[in-house]
Amino acid sequence: MTDTATLPATSLAGLYALSAVSATETQEAVLARIARVHPALNAIVALDDAGAREAAAASAARWRDGVPLSALDGVPITVKDNIAAAGLPCSWGSPLLRDVVPERDELPVARCRAAGMVILGKTNVPEFTLQGYTANPVHGVTRNPWDTALTPGGSSGGAVAAVAAGLGPLALGTDGGGSIRRPCSHTGLVGLKPSIGRVPRCDGLPAILLDCEGVGPIARTTADLVALLAIIAPPDARDPASRGMPPLAVPPAAPRLRILFVPRFGPHPVDPEIAERVAAAAHRLAVLGHAVEEGAPPFDIDALNPLFGTIGAAGLAWLLAERFPGAAPEAPMLREMAEAGRTLPATRLFAALAGVAAFRRRMAAFFGSGWDAILTPAAAALPWPAAEVAPATIDGQPVGPRGHAVFTNFANLAGLPGIALPCEPSATGLPIGFQLVGPAGSDGLLCAVAAEWERAEPWAGRWPAPA
């Protein structure tokens, strides 16, 4: 018999509507699976079993009465530990926030609760969500369900590990430089970094990456991702960026797109298996009818990286000065970042912000010139040992701590939507993913292409062992 805990969210809702399965039964199955599978992963750092059972029972009663609150009423979901959920710890991976328990939900969590979804708990992150693996001095190391010796990536590493292992079909993550898309590529999932304003935010942690970071959905299927996005995406007056966002619309069939395929960024190395699998995906999209042309990126990534680094350093230094005077992060790399931010001239930060604004104009012009999407690998490296911050080499070449992350942060700086999709796994079975990045507001279009890709190259049946 199928383990109810491993069913997609939309399938669960269909069973609830038929009274074939109840939200209470699903919740017990998920908790049993967590007890069995989770000890090897360390993905969920605060499990609210009592609250989840109570929410599931209330949902089951609504379905019995024929008055569900939404299409996802009673579906379990986890929340990344840098997104506030009332009554649950929100440590942000730092000892400085070890005892923080918010009294209010951040808006996306509040919307999930209002939709009747069952909040399972919080998922692990690296300290201040500023690194591309998932470990911290508060909750330890999170491991990849596909190989527990390896990392699921970061900073949404706990979120993807939970969904990939069947510990709830959905997760809320954040993406400030690829933190949804890269971990999804390492665990065989679909994940969306939304356009600025697509998912409004308020009542959350300080925005140390400004509007480069957004909350987004993580799922096993595109249909599940779209269902969750529909719940969290409506505009809200408390987030001005959301007021100018066009309504979310996912076409029933994806139109034919003109896609720029960028296999690598300049001299930055890419794992050969990733390069091969993503090139095959680009070819397959062309077979499906899209106009896919290989070329160079319409920007110099090495000119963009200092902009991202300046914003991150200034944001971290500001947070520490405002909330924790005299304190420092535990991670050596973050201590260096904070010190750099403290000594940063205001003129350099202003120049970085001006550079970001110019880059956004440049990317708007690029998409206005006839291109519909950019296709790249989602990550330059396969997963590496779980306790290591980053791979030291890729394809035999030495790389810095963000060498594996080279493909993703341009979308954050430009405020563009990006979706990560699984393609053919590596020879050893490790997941590999690619990303599609579109113009601002094209979140629904990317989801339509994702659905088309999933029909052509289904991935949801792939499970890490034991499934």
Image (tube, grey):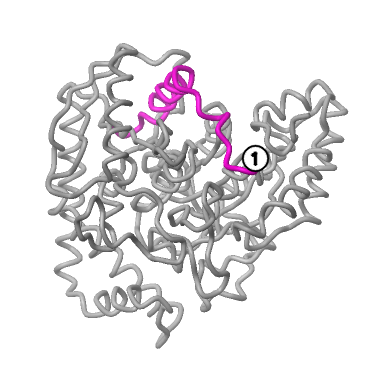
Left or right: 434, with 187 as reference point = left
Front position in the image: 59 or 203: 59
Above or below residue 108? Residue 2 is above
Left or right: 183, with 40 as reference point = left
User: For the view shown, which residue lies furthest in the bottom direction?
Assistant: 326
Residue 382 image point, x, y percent: 37, 48
x 28%, y 69%: residue:
313
Residue 178 image point, x, y percent: 36, 49
Residue 57 image point, x, y percent: 85, 42
x 78%, y 49%: residue:
32
**Residue 242 appears in the figure:** no
Q: How many marks?
A: 1
Front position in the image: 153 or 323: 153
Which stretch appears magenta? 439-467
Q: Mark 1: which amino acid?
A: Ala
Front position in the image: 97 or 104: 97
x 15%, y 38%: residue:
297
Question: Helix, strand, or loop for circle 1?
Answer: loop
Left or right: 118, with 56 as reference point = left
Residue 366 image point, x, y percent: 16, 31
